[in-house]
Amino acid sequence: MRVAFAVLLVAAVTAPVSAVAQQPKNFEVRRERVNKVWDEQIEKIRTRRVASDCRAEAKKRFSAIRFNKRRQFVASCIEQARR
């Protein structure tokens, strides 16, 4: 009877310890996911800002009649900003 009680006691103590040991790993996985989403949002904001700045600059340099040159300028400007 004492042996069975000792085995149950050991099993009861080791189960919560293993669950606590896994918690930081889960926390790190969540943190990585949040950081990934955060980085993607920052990149989207940066891309939009660059595109709007390039369009504004193209608007200053080329008239509405030169729409092809405007488009080419915007595309090249965005490409240069990526580098």
Image (cartoon, rainbow, N blue to C red):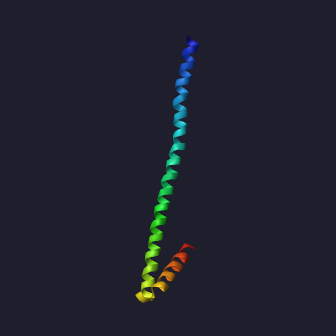
Name above or below for residue 63 compared with residue 17.
below
Q: Is residue 5 above or below residue 60?
A: above
Front position in the image: 74 or 5: 74
Total marks in image: 0
Report x, y in % for residue 4.
56, 14
Q: In x, y percent, where is residue 27?
A: 50, 45
| Nearer to me, 17 or 82 | 82
4 on left or right of 64: right
Q: Is residue 63 visible?
A: no
Q: Residue at x 53, y 47 (%)?
A: 29
Regarding residue 2, the answer to whether it shows in the image is yes
Residue 45 lies, with reference to residue 27, above or below; the image says below
The residue shown at (50%, 83%) is 73
Q: Position of residue 74 (x, y in %)?
A: 49, 80
Image quadrant in which the N terminus is located: top right
Residue 8 position in % (x across, y down): 54, 19
* Residue at 56%, 12% in the rendered image: 2
Q: Residue at x 46, y 62 (%)?
A: 41
Q: Quadrant of the C terminus?
A: bottom right
Q: Nearer the viewer, residue 64 or 19?
A: 64
Hey, which residue is sitting farthest top in the picture? 1
Foreground residue among 68 and 30: 68
